[in-house]
Amino acid sequence: MKKIFFLVAVYSFSASKILSQIHQDKISENGSKNFDVVIQSNNQLSRVGFSNDIKAAAMRDFIKSFEDATNVMWRIADDGCSVNFNYKNEKLTSYYNKLGDHIFTTKTYTRSELDPVIARLVKNQAGEDFSIYLVTETIRANNTTYEISLQNNSQWCIVKLIKRGRGEIEKLSENIYLQKG
């Protein structure tokens, strides 16, 4: 009798594990989201993963923060996971540690989407002959960091700023490079 119960228990556990992986694309709270999951090892994509490879804390935070996200692609690495997605017409990436805690979210965009106050500040610092080319914004719990690429006819420049929780803006660094040509 004990042997039969043990076999039934093992079979039930195995079947539920297999079914959860077969239906890995249905993992939101309401069952309506579709996600792609990829396992990453040593900076190389190695195999398709399953939704149960993602820490529950990371999935809960993502769904709570970005409920209407589309084109969602999870990448799982040894030190945590990241998720690339579209949200409100923006391309974003959120990063989570091994425990599933949110670390930060980044988005990349052009000058037209940059806060005008920050754009003016950067142009004043770099010079009016520089044009803002690309912005990478890193959003953490208490601050936002901007890495802004600018260029003119002979140089390009990267300016890093931080906007703290109370709104004060501080320049972290500025690097100017000559263009080859």
Image (cartoon, rainbow, N blue to C red):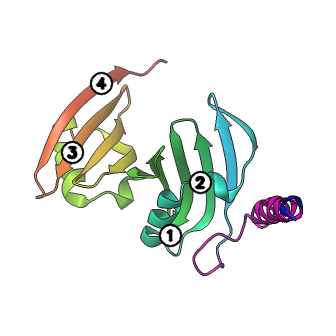
- Please tell me which residue lies in front, 50 or 20: 20
- Residue 172 against residue 121 in the figure, above or below: above
Residue position marked by numbered label 2 in the rendering: 54
From the viewer's perspective, tell me whether residue 120 is left or right of residue 145. Answer: left
From mark 4 to mark 2, how far is it between C-alphas? Answer: 40 Å
- Asked if the residue under mark 3 is in contact with the one under mark 4, i.e. CB atoms within 8 Å, the reply is no
Q: Which residues are magenta?
A: 4-32
Query: Residue 107 appears at what percent x and percent y?
Result: 43, 53
Question: Dot 2: what SS?
Answer: loop
Which secondary structure dominates the residues rendered in magenta? Answer: helix
- Residue 95 against residue 3 in the figure, above or below: above
- Mark 2 burial class by Cα count in 10 Å: few <14, some 14-19, many 20+: many
Question: Dot 4: what SS?
Answer: strand
From mark 4 to mark 3, how far is it between C-alphas? Answer: 19 Å
Query: Residue 130 appears at what percent x and percent y?
Result: 30, 38
Dot 4 or dot 3: first in sequence order is 3
Residue position marked by numbered label 3 in the rendering: 162
- Asked if the residue under mark 1 is in contact with the one under mark 4, i.e. CB atoms within 8 Å, the reply is no
Question: Dot 3: what SS?
Answer: strand
Dot 3 or dot 1: first in sequence order is 1
Is residue 10 a member of the stretch shown in magenta? yes
From mark 2 to mark 1, how far is it between C-alphas? Answer: 13 Å
Q: In front: mark 3 or mark 1? A: 1
From mark 3 to mark 1, how far is it between C-alphas? Answer: 27 Å
Residue at 37% across / 25% down in the picture? 154
